Amino acid sequence: MAFDSLHSHSRIKMGLHRPILHGKVNFPLCLAPMVGLTHVALREVMREYLPKDAFTIWPTEMLNSRRIPGENLEKTPETLRAPSETGLVPQILGNEEEPIAASVQRLIEWGAEAIDINMGCPVQKALKHNYGVALMGDPQYAAEVVRMTVKNSSVPVSVKLRAVGSTKEFDELLSFVMGLRNSGASWVCLHPRTAAQKRRGSADWEQIRQLHAAVDFPVIGNGDIQTAEDAIAMLQETGCDMAMAGRGLAARPWMLWQLGEELGFAAPEGKEGLQAPRTNEEEGAEYGRCLLKLIEKCRYYFGEDLAMRKVRFYVRTTSVWLPFGNTLVGVCAKARTTEEMMAGVQKFFEGPVEMSPRTELRQ
């Protein structure tokens, strides 16, 4: 991974043209909320790669507002959190004021520094209940969902949404977003890939650029970020305030460290004097170290059985950047305990493993 062409920009501020979380956020890359992945164990592993003195936002998995009021947030896997975690922005699915109000109150007591509303989930279950991307088909009701959330929240409220069909329909997107803004949304995150596309096709970054230029509040861009170079390209090409990455960042958490080096941040705590992994081989070795840490964290938070399921899902999702990734999937699938899993992972990474910068799998 060559960054030589970017060194002249290494002290230039990128992103964060408009304040997020009252200006607390000073780092322009964050993790996307992902079902089965964005849990406390992965967040803790990733925070070890965040540059010193950098502050970004951290999501949860999608949380159903109809369930949150009755759940024990300290024991539910999706809402487990480390006591030291900051910048938490849990994401909720919802469309009714009573459960939204109760959920928001509980999540603020839990430690939420903002609340994110999901209007981007394309799965059939969400569509059936008028959650997620279904709300994008009803701009007035979507604005009302934001209004009822803001009304019941003492912290900022954001919205994650998907694209319209093409840049020709930009006026439709802008009108939709302005409805959210007028209802009190503090920022939006745009994933410019339509619900019909799901993970196919390329994300249309031009929609992010146009939206950021047309509104007066923060816009986060999401889609097709697999490397730190991609994050820099999105920030520079679209002018967005932050870049959000999903599976690409989950696969290489040290992308935070790489970007920090380009922006002039100090190395992460505990990594003083070191440089972020750059070559394919260095990244492959780091993936192995990262996976071992994740197994330990998952075992600590989730117990043996759930930990193995969480790790297996992580490996199935992220090993596509590795040669013979399917072999690693098999190693984790065959393990009967986390100890066996760790031993198998250590053996897999005994020799050099090169991690590819990109995969065909869309982000």
Image: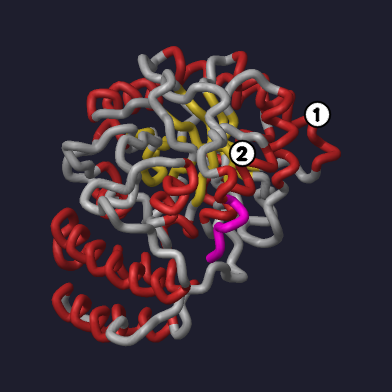
Between the C-alphas of marks 2 and 1, the distance is 15 Å
> Picture coordinates of residue 95 (x, y %)?
50, 29
Residue identified by numbered label 1 = 171
> Picture coordinates of residue 13 (x, y %)?
54, 34
> Picture coordinates of residue 362 (x, y %)?
60, 62
Q: Residue at x 41, y 57 (%)?
A: 250
Residue identified by numbered label 2 = 190
Q: Is residue 82 left or right of residue 171?
A: left
User: Which color scheme did the rendering employ for the protein?
Assistant: secondary structure
State whether residue 331 is above or below residue 114: below
What secondary structure is marked by label 1?
helix
Q: Judge whether residue 4 is colored magenta.
A: yes
For badge 2, the amino acid type reads: Leu
Q: Is residue 166 left or right of residue 103?
A: right
State whether residue 174 is above or below residue 194: above
- Rendering quarter of residue 298: bottom left
For badge 1, the amino acid type reads: Asp
Can the viewer see residue 161? no
- Rendering quarter of residue 5: bottom right
Q: Earlier in the sequence, mark 2 or mark 1?
A: 1
- Rendering quarter of residue 241: top right
Q: Nearer the viewer, residue 262 or 252?
A: 262
State whether residue 321 is above or below residue 66: below
Start-end of magenta stretch: 1-6
Which image quadrant: the C terminus? Answer: bottom right
Q: Residue at x 38, y 33 (%)?
A: 89
Can the viewer see residue 207? yes
